[in-house]
Every structure is written in structure tokens, then in C-alpha cells.
Image: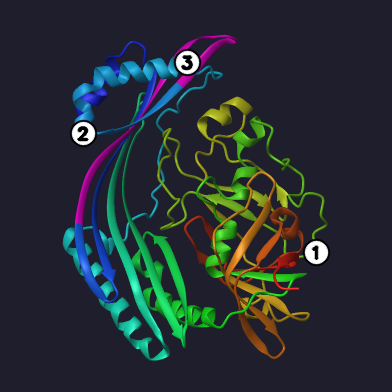
Amino acid sequence: MDPRLLDALRSHPEVHDWTVRMQRTFGLQTYLVGETVENVREVERVAYQVEVFNDHAGPAGPSRGSASLPLTTPDLERLDEILADAVIMASLVHNPPWTLPPPAPLPQVELADPDLLTRTDMLRASHDAVELIRDRTAAERAGGVRLSAAELFVDRVDDELQTSTGVTAETTATEILLEATLLARHGDDEAEYFRQARARRLDQIGLADTIRHGARFARDKVRARPPRTRIGPVVVAGEALGQMMGGNVIGAPAYLTQADASAAFLKISRFEVGAPVYLGGERSGDPLTLRANATHPFSIRSYRADADGVPAQDVLLIEDGILVARWATQRYGQYLGLPVTGRAGVAEVGPGTTPAADLASADGPAYRVVAFSAANVDALSGDFGMEIRLGYEVTATGEEPITGGSVTGNLFEAMAGARFSRETGLFADYAGPIAIRLEAVQVAGED
């Protein structure tokens, strides 16, 4: 941590509290065009995230405002100017006062792949991963599939947090981002399968399975037809399930949003502690149990201390379909008098008892969706409407691929009759069953 920044914050008369997070990142970025390595880049950067707090008299009485500042090393040469502007911004915000937490013991959370901690390790692992991608895609050529492009980013991040109340936390984490596009051709028709995956360990990506499944999905998409319009069972599996149960580009996962203390404070939560989370529906499926787990090993959403310095926790939110607690940041925990849990970790759902392969085979035909075009679950209402990138109509005679059309419904209501697979997996924002069967949702397609 640069002492100039800490000294400036400590000495500023109108900065009444502060937090500073410094991240040092070293990364390797590998780009493939086809099966040819186009470029390999080494990236090093240092970034600061600073939040300053100003206490003042607001229209309704004592108030606290804050301002967040992303800084780079050159910005440290003009701290007086930057902090003066930040204090002005914070003084214009009139929130009820709250305080930052004091130091507390921090849990040990597994966040780093031990095989990716040095530059040599990262170079070797990236090289091996690229060779594996090449080998597996070469094996798929005979089936009419080729690799269009791929990107593999491998990062090590050293994170240091300090706060005005004396919290100090240091963490080393790794993160892998893979993007791969596979193309399948059948006659004059061509279809694309795109996969994006984030993880902390390379073995979580499952490179061989990613290429094998992606090749199959691309081939199936070439011959896929639109689904038939109907209301009936839909099994959401794999990548599609991660999209439905995880967050999207503008918000957190729907269940974590509804169980957030800030949503209760703002009176936008539809869930009440002690009440079922099915919006009036009667449970007929597997009971929903959900945790916000910030200590889950190697989850992208895990941490040791959140931005305020609150230690990571594993919090039971929903048990057997009943909301039993809310997760609460330091601010909203104090506002509502709730236990402070820190920022929510990964949304972790308990498993069911049915094998994933059996979820689509019970009680007549069903659709099984493996990829949506985009995540689109409204976190406030629970309503969703998602285009099917690829799925399958499952009947007694086999499976037929489908694409296009959409699946619509309400996630909270549909979960009352849902059945969960006994097999589990870890996605970027979600951990739990790898497949969930929703009994009666609308599929819009061909008449």
C-alpha cells in the first residue's frame, strides 16, 4: 500500500472514515484465431479502490455520505485535488449514519490455484491448456466442427485492504477466463456455439469437456428446429442453469437480491422472514434451501473480507422454502438491527435426490435447455423471459435439438414445484444442482 495515500486520508480533516483496497494483478492473455496462437500478452497493473466517508448535518439531521474513487498510481501525484472533490461529493449525500466495522478474525478461504502462483507456472499452464484445446478441436474436425477463436486469460491478484478502523486484510487469488467459439457446418448451413467460463482453477473449466460438449452442441444447433408452443415441464441444465440462477450484467442473482437487507430497507423485497418464498404457491416439489456462501472454496464470489472489512461468512438464507435470515452489509445491518454478514457470496442451493439424467424423462415429453442467449431474470419480480440458444425436446423415442423461441414464467412461483438433481456443480454466481426441472412454464415457439 502506498503510504502517500494512507497519510493523505488520515490527515484530511473532512474524511471521517475511509477504506482502501489495492490490487496488484499479473496476467497472461492468450488469443487463438482458429487453432493458431495469434498473440500472448503479459499484463501487470496496480489499481486502488478508495471510499471516503464524510459526516455532516443533512436536511433530516446527522448524515453520512460517501464517494468511491478508482485510482491508478499516477493519480497519487494529485491526491489533494482528488480528495477535495471526493469530500464535496460525499457531503452532498445525506444517508443515515453508520460506522465501519472494527478488526475481527478473518477466515482462511481457498481462492488461489496453487499451480498458477508464479509466472513460470502460469506460462506452463497456459501452454498446456492451449495444446489441449488444439488437440480436442482437431479431433472434432471429422465431425464438421472447427475452432473459430478462443481467448484464455490467467490472472493472479494480490489484494490488500486497509480501513480507518484498523482492519487489514491480505489475499492472493487466481482467476481464469475462457471464451471459445466453435463452428459446425452441415451442407450449406453453419451454426456457432459460444462458451464463456470463469473460475479460480483451470480444472474447474473442464477444457476437454468444454470442447467435446461444445462440438456436440454446435452440430446439434445446425439441425435444430424451433420449439413447439406449450405450457409444460422444462429442465434447465448446465450453462443455462448458471444463467438462470446466477446474476446478470446489471444485478445480483434474484434470490440473493430478495434476501438482501438493503432490499428490505428499501421495501422492494417480496420475501418476508419466516414466510415461504414461493409467492403464495403451494410447494409440491423439492424443498428449496439456499445459502449465501462467501467461504465456498475457489468460488469467484468468495473472499476473506468484503469492501468494508467484514469477514466472509456462510449464511443460511432459505431453509425448506422458508426465508430464515437476510444477508446484510455493515450499513444495512446497522440500519435494520440485523446481524452483519458482509457481502453475499455465491448463491448455493441444496441438492435433490433425482439423477440429472432422469429429470427430463418423467411424466411425458419435456424440454431440456442447456443454453440461453442471455440471462434475463428480473431480480425484483422473479419474472423471466429467455431465448433458447440450444435445448432438446425429450420424448420416449429420444431427443431432438431445438433453438429459438423463449421460456417465460416466474422463478419464485415455478420453484414451488421444482425438482433438483442430486449431482451438483459450481458456476460463477451459483453453486448447487446441475439441473432443475420446472413443472409448468410457458415455451413460445411454433404453433
Q: Does residue 259 appear to the left or right of 16 in the view shown?
A: right
Q: In front here: 222 or 252?
A: 222
Q: Nearer the viewer, mark 2 or mark 1?
A: 2
Q: Where is residue 41 in the image (x, y as percent from the top left)?
A: 20, 58
Residue occupying the point 24% across, 25% down:
5
Q: Is residue 389 magenta?
A: no
The amino acid at mark 2 is Thr
The amino acid at mark 1 is Ser
- Mark number, residue 73: 2
Residue occupying the point 22% across, 22% down:
78
Q: Which of marks 3 and 1 is in front?
A: 3
Q: Does residue 437 appear to the left or right of 98 in the view shown?
A: right
The vertical placement of 256 against 14, above or below, is below
- For the magenta stretch, what is the residue range? 42-65
Q: In front here: 83 or 189?
A: 189
Residue at label 3? 92
* N-term-proximal mark, 2 vs 1: 2
- Mark number, residue 284: 1
The vertical placement of 132 against 329, above or below, is below
Q: Is residue 53 magenta?
A: yes
- How far apart are labels 3 and 2 at the CA level? 27 Å
Q: State the SS at label 1.
A: loop
* N-term-proximal mark, 3 vs 1: 3
